Image (cartoon, rainbow, N blue to C red):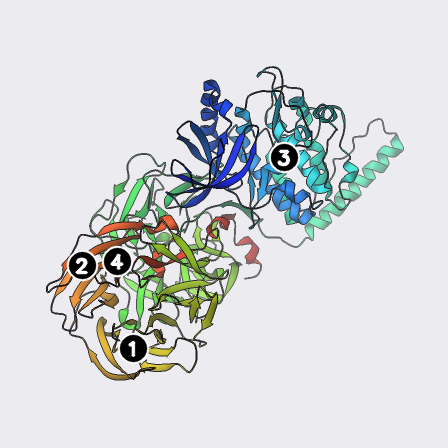
Amino acid sequence: MPLASGGFIGPYKILGSLGAGGMGEVYKAVDTRLDRIVAIKIPAPHLLRDTAWIARFEREARVLASLNHPNIAALYGIEQGGDIRALVMEYVEGPTLAERILRGPVPIEDLLPIARQIADALEAAHEKGVIHRDIKPANVKVTPEGTVKVLDFGIAKSLPAELVPGDPDSESTVTAGPTVAGAILGTPPYMAPEQARGKSVDRRGDIWSFGCLLFELLSGKRAFGGESISDTLASVIKDDPDFGAIPAATPARVVDLVRRCLRKEPRQRLRDMGEARLVFEETQSGAPAPAPAAVRRTGLGLRERIAWASALVLSAAAGFLTWYFRPVSPVKLRKSMFAVKFASNEERPSLDMDGRRILFTAEGRVWLRDFSQLEARALPNTDGASSTAWSHDGRNAIFFAGGKIWKMPDDGGGNRTSIASTQPVLRSGGLIWTPDGRIIFSTGTSGLLEVPAAGGEPRVLLPPQVEKGESDLHHPTLLPDGRGILFVTHTAKGPDTVSVFSDGSRKDVLQLEGELIWAPVYSPSGHVLFALSKKRQGLWAVRFSLASLAVSGEPFLVAADGNSPSVSRNGSLAYVSGASEGTFQLSSVTRDGKSIADEVTADLGQTLTEPAVSPDGTRIAAILTDGGNPDLWVFHPARQTRTRLTFTAEQEGVPHWSPRGDWIAYSCSTAICVKPADGSGQAKILVKQAGSLKDISPDGKTLLYSSQSGGKDELWEVSLNGAGIPSPGEIKRLPISWSNQLREARFSPDGRYLIYSTVSSTGSEAVMVTSYPDGQGKWQVARGSQPRFLPDGRELLFIDSSDALMVAAFENGPPPVIGSPKRILNLSSIGVLGFYGFEVFPTGQKVLMVRQKSGAAADRQIIVVENWFAEFDRKQ
């Protein structure tokens, strides 16, 4: 019985039908737990009445679920509801190759990346002993981003044998044969000869079908056909394809590959799909084709032998001279890559010392890839992980999760053990395990901290120089031979700095004006690699001397789309391809996370941060960065319009609306500015030499900002005069003190309290409430960040250390009564990057979140390069 839209199978809500056939139906559905679209495949009722079939079906589904490959549509699981049993599959957008072929032959430049990805998928499956059995154009899709997905992997293997007469051009999978043992299974035009004869099929059957697919992509027509299924099967067994239909411009080695795939005798066929993948990779790279094998000659006469000997001598001499006077070429690079679906921007990979294994975080877990194996695997008990590193001896993995640092055996077995057990770690700024048994790390909001690898309480190793405007230290990495620690310093305003901490002192080694620097790491080639994310985005390197701890020469580009580098002791380089920040959306989300609407989407390569909702809820102010300095924009989602408010080379940020929504205040370099929200008129400076804007009072008469004095944050207020664009009045410091660094401060809706967050030198961040304006009482809410009052003043929202949205009840005092915080939404589950800000809509029922654009993360890859520097040695 067809399923109606809106119905449920377990947690999956049916959205509509995708198609039906003799073996069952396919539906589009949404997973209400994980908020993702899936494909639901429901076998026909007569199959579900066959208990033997069900047992075999479930066994093979478990095998298929193990195929974790970027070019294979994933099998998520089996779901049962009532008398319905369903396969839950990855939903893949985009046309099938069958639809693409309808437009004619595929140009070779488009075919090569498609064919390479199909070959890669089949190679990985065959290595695990899984055969597809039904490779054809209709079972391959190409997403809008160009990623190939092979569908229905091995599902046909579970189908029973039954005689299916009919149209040979049908794209339906058929089976034919009197018994299960002699079943003919597949789609006739793509069946291997042994498959057409009803014999057993191994991976060479997939290789034949792949050859048929290649032929059709190149020529635009099928390799085999006939008026009936019997005629088609007979053609497969006895006929040869018309290879003259393949365009003459097709590279010879690609044509040769098609011929080798379509040899009738399985033992003479292409041996494995790895050979095919190499052909496509070499053709794409422009590598020269191998020379044809020499012809063996026998029975030559004396004159012929002398002629051949002379030719060989001359050829050898010419070859020697060519070799002797050749330009010296660098060591050849070896590059490999694999796709990763990153769930956040905390993806920095970590190679082990010998470059044999790599750790990385994706989808909220730690993954391990041993390069002697085909696939990466997720390590158990690592949910919520945000960064990884190896122990110094390579026997343990360490990572951040749930506000702590954990270690576990490198094979993923055993239980994880807490290292930093007393201080929460909010956001990862990187971590390392030193040879002398220390973990050195940054929370992303602190200096460099250290804790014994055996566990204990973190202490400050190197604080940021607050008096110089430094906000935090990031990404510590070790220099060899105990020479020191390399790290990067972020500042509230101004360029970042790469520094070395050695023998108890700090030395700044690199600063690039107007740039944001991430993840510096030393390479044994004598370089420091680092990522830039503003004007010169990409992965860069610069010469670095261990003797002088100094850089020399100019930085040079290593990978235009690279970031997050890691280098092993033998010089292998791993990095993530794609922009480090990704593409962003501003999305309205109900407090339970069940309804999400994308209000504003940034263009590719842009970053949206610090959103602020207008008092009437119709407009959004946000900071948009497009490869340069951040600027303030106002978006009107309902009208699909946007207005740019600032055009300066300054660092704009922290927008706040006036109570009537007619003007916006924001931080502008070292000042606080104000400008009409419609973009008219000039910006006006309210306060010079100010720190960060915090909030505007509910009555619009007071503006709150922070400033530093003696290395400590102070809170100041300025009275605002005028009915329109305000003018500054009296400025005074509030009598509120704290021992830690101030992050945020917001007024309560009635203006009687302030909610704020502070961060300690060890990265511990706390949410507090104090009375305004006297600061006489202080009440701690919880550990967390980004606190907000809801518009009715009865609840507080904040982000906890595990990036979850928390709520606590609030009753006015004096003194106020604050309820126990409760988790209401896991931000990572809906793709939210909580670090970049959120805001509450005026109704209080929705929040505005910064989300990573759907699909952006799936396009990214980890690239591993051996001898990465060989390409650049001749340039330096």
How far is the residue under mark 1 from the one under mark 4? 27 Å
- 426 sits to left or right of 488: left
How many residues crowd around disc 3 within 10 Å: few (fewer than 14), some, or many (20 or more)?
A: many
How far is the residue under mark 2 from the one under mark 3? 62 Å
In percent of width and height, residue 215 lies at 70, 37
Question: In which quadrant will I find the C terminus?
Answer: bottom right
How many residues crowd around disc 4 within 10 Å: few (fewer than 14), some, or many (20 or more)?
A: many
The answer to whether residue 485 shows anywhere in this view is no
How far is the residue under mark 3 from the one under mark 4? 52 Å
Q: Disc 4 marks which residue?
A: 797
Rendered view: 181 above or below 356 = above
Query: Closest to the observer: 444 or 21?
Result: 21
Kindly report which numbered mark, 1 or 4, lies closer to the viewer in this rendering: 4
Q: Secondary structure at mark 3?
A: loop
Q: Disc 2 marks which residue?
A: 810
Q: Are marks 2 and 1 in contact (CB under 8 Å)?
A: no
Q: Disc 3 marks which residue?
A: 136
Identify the residue shown where x is 74% and y is 35%. 293
How far is the residue under mark 3 from the one under mark 1? 65 Å
Rendered view: 618 above or below 61 = below
Amino acid, disc 4: Leu
